[in-house]
Image (tube, helix red, strand yellow):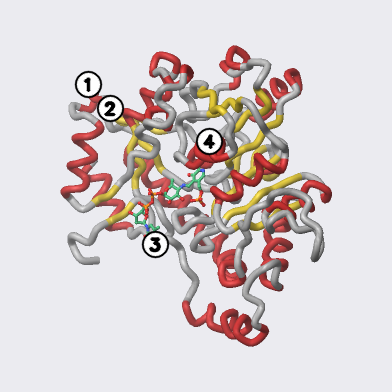
Amino acid sequence: MPENKPIYVTQPALPELKDFIPYLEQIWENKILTNNGPFHQQLEKELAAFLGVPYISLFANGTLALLTALQVLRITGEVITTPYSFVATTHSLWWNNIKPVFVDIEPEYGNLDPEKIEAAITPKTTAIMPVHVYGNPCKVERMQEIADTYGLKVIYDAAHTFGVNYNGQSICNYGDLSILSFHATKVFNTMEGGAIVCHDAATKKRIDYLKNFGFAGETKVMAPGINSKMNEMQAALGLLQLKGYPQNAEKRKVIAETYRKELANVKGISLLDEPENTDANHAYFPIFIDEKEYGMSRDELYEKLRQSNVFGRRYFYPLISEFSMYKSLDSARPANLPIASKMANEVICLPIYPELESDSIKKITALL
Ligand code: T4K
């Protein structure tokens, strides 16, 4: 490896190009490019089996899956959500004319704190949209209890959670719907892509209508749907990526273990615990910097790493609630979100991806 090659927070896993060519040839041969083509159908089947979920619908990206999920369940009014996520989570509410209500996170994993939800419920609340941030499961049982008590839907933004099992089953089996992202930066990618996981055939049918303009047959439109279909090239790539996934997941695990070992005793750096009863996917490796103990602020360290060509990222800083379009909401007040504010101010996500070389890991841990 050249001494000073940039090391980014992630690098997409890709199959060998030669293995993709036969798929492309097949697409060119049958001239079905999109609209529920053969690769699309095959990928839905294979993903449902691989993940262990009953029904999955593919999307062009995770954001369109989120937007559509809210339409599927006819969510309106107010939705309780986390400020500690990628901005797409809250944007999906805004695009559906829903008011986001931010609730603070728990300090263990940075997920929406179920114990703070009840105080934020109003007569207009219709759903909860938590995020399994970094791929670590939310407190799903408690979340469901609250949702059931108040008659709310739960839509999980599971964009980080591909392949994660909790209590022996896919984390995507919890809640009413779960949304996955297959973006280039995710553990399983179709360049861009996403999916909704649901529990029953009738809901899948509605999802599939909505992602195709609302068409239910050639002449019937049953809802003002959108175009959020995954195309055949994305689906073909997905089929190939699925074959490489177990090996890539194993490589990520080894990298995470190395970081854990090397950083365990660095004063001022804390890590998230490995979640219990969980097969993790090691999608991200966040570290948290205590300025006093470490002797340097998070931002100073971030810049220092950059100067050495190590491009970690401050996911998720700033909080979504700090962006101008959400800042004026009552629930966006920093005083309402002390734990989220603290985590956002201390986090750096270190580079982690299957092809990250051991020399690079050594360089990063030595710098830290
Ligand atoms: N919900 C949550 C919780 C999410 O995290 C996301 C997306 C969504 C919903 C929405 O899902 P999608 O609609 O995206 O499917 C990235 C991604 O664009 C975004 O997908 C992701 N979350 C978010 C956490 O990260 P950026 O702006 O940080 O990406 P970017 O382009 O700076 O990429 C980071 C690094 O990755 C680059 O420095 C280099 C490397 N990279 C990136 C790309 C795109 C590559 O090596 N190759 C590539 O093609 O947002």
Q: Earlier in the sequence, mark 2 or mark 1?
A: 2
Please tell me which of labels 3 and 1 falls first in the chain: 1
Q: Are marks 4 and 2 in contact (CB under 8 Å)?
A: no
Q: Position of residue 272 (x, y in %)?
A: 44, 32
Nearest the eye: 293 or 179: 179
Label 2 lies in ligand 1 vicinity (Cβ under 8 Å): no
Q: Is residue 136 visible?
A: no
Image quadrant for the N terminus? Answer: bottom left
User: Which of the 4 image quarters holds residue 120?
Assistant: top right
Residue 219 x, y percent position in the rendering:
80, 63
The amino acid type found where label 3 is placed reads: Glu
> Element under label 2?
loop
Residue 268, which numbered label? 2
Tell me where residue 202 appears, x and y as whole percent: 83, 48
Residue matched to label 1: 292
Category of crowding for the residue at label 1, using alpha-carbon neighbours closer than 10 angstroms: few (below 14), some (14–19), many (at least 20): few
Three-letter amino acid code at disc 4? Trp
Q: Earlier along the polypeptide chain: callout 2 or callout 3? A: 2
- Residue at mark 3 to residue at mark 1: CA–CA distance: 34 Å
Q: Which residue is mark 3?
A: 355
The answer to whether residue 56 is visible is yes
> Alpha-carbon distance for marks 4 and 3?
37 Å
Q: Is residue 282 left or right of residue 60?
A: left
Which residue does the image show at 48% across and 76% down from the upper left? Answer: 16
Marks 2,1: beta carbons within 8 A: yes
Q: Mark 4 packing: few (<14 Cα in 10 Å), some, or many (20+)?
A: some
Which is closer to the viewer, label 4 or label 3? 4
Residue linked to disc 4: 94
Query: Cβ–Cβ below 8 Å for labels 4 and 1?
Result: no
